[in-house]
Amino acid sequence: MIARLRSLTTQWTSVVPVLSIVLLAFTWGRDLPAAVVAVVTLVLAGAVLAAVHHAEVVAHRVGEPFGSLVLAVAVTVIEVALIVTLMADGGGKSSTLARDTVFAAVMITCNGIVGLCLLVASVRHGTAVFNPEGTGAALATVATLATLSLVLPTFTTSKPGPEFSGVQLTFAAISSLILYGLFVATQTVRHRDYFLPISRQGGVITTDDHADTPTVRTAWISLALLGLALIGVVGLAKGVSPTIESAVEAAGLHHAVVGVIIALLVLLPETIAALRSARRDRVQTSLNLALGSAMASIGLTIPAVALASIWLSGPLVLGLGSTHMVLLALTVVVSSLTVVPGRATPLQGGVHLVLFAAYLELAINP
């Protein structure tokens, strides 16, 4: 019976990514009727679950922290491609698209995903335990990247408005790539043990006993299907965005809510994967996913839009407003206090979730 269930899981998780790509090809750039939107939403949900399944297969084969890195980078690369594509479409709203998407990703990952994982792990296991050295290094990198790319443009004077000059944008792009590259090298080579899950006795957990290790062939197939699923997730999310936009406008909400909803859809695979790790008491893996996604979102998006700005017309607004800067500063301070002890209670999870709720509230009522 168990073997049959596994076979059924393998079958649908292999079919849905391909189906999502086929559906994406037929719906891309078209106005969708309500019935088609319902089908797209259903396939989108299936693609999210399939992406999580294949990411876990790859992660189990290559081990941590490589597994969480694969999912974070894969999602971000596709997300960056989507941002550049939308910016190329033009329009007045595209000037703030990169900023809004990156900031949404930071708040969703650093407060939403982190808060949920800490809450789930601490309620289920008493406390959530993780390695403060690795998590602290990740948080410091995220804070530096966010400040350089999203805060400084508000205060620079070489160009009017919350924008970088060409030289400043080049510096920010190169700095982002260097910092992200240094972090990946630290995470995967020199200090890999800082990013491995730890036991409650303080020892590093190097194996995962929840399933048999997949073969190399299975891992490669899952990696390919993961890519297809993520392309489907991001592409179909873009496809349903006009419907979401119309619903937001009909409800009288601020347009920024659309970006938040799209970011939530795109980050669903990482959210589910992180929660599953938290339930298994692998909180370090959850934090690797969350902070790694925030870092990749900044470290890859800013260089990409800097390069794209060469041929794209219109301004590139990166600087945050005062309200969002306060939220970012509070997130960094609270996250630092959470990381230092190396363990967390439901209180810390709740604090992060309240910050995330505040971000959502201010997106709806700025």
Image (spheres, rainbow, N blue to C red):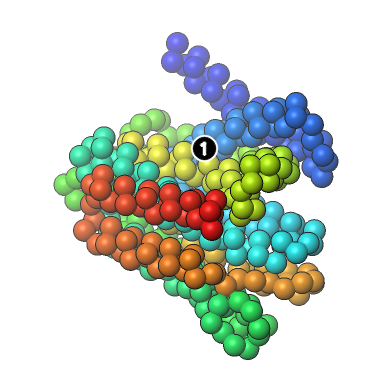
Asked if 364 appears above or below 157 in the picture, the reply is above
Q: Quadrant of residue 318?
A: bottom right
| Residue in the image at 60% along x and 23% along y | 11
* Residue toward you, 318 or 2: 318
Question: Looking at the image, which residue sits at the far bottom?
Answer: 158
Asked if 92 appears above or below 251 in the picture, the reply is below
Asked if 141 appears above or below 287 in the picture, the reply is below
Asked if 153 appears above or below 181 in the picture, the reply is below
Assign the C terminus to one quadrant of the image.
Answer: bottom right
Q: Position of residue 255 (x, y in %)?
A: 64, 53
Q: Position of residue 135 (x, y in %)?
A: 34, 59
| Residue in the image at 65% along x and 65% along y | 96
Question: Looking at the image, which residue sits at the far left?
Answer: 201
| Residue in the image at 59% along x and 46% along y | 261
Secondary element at image label 1: helix
Q: Residues within 10 Å of mark 1 (few under 14, many from 20)?
A: many
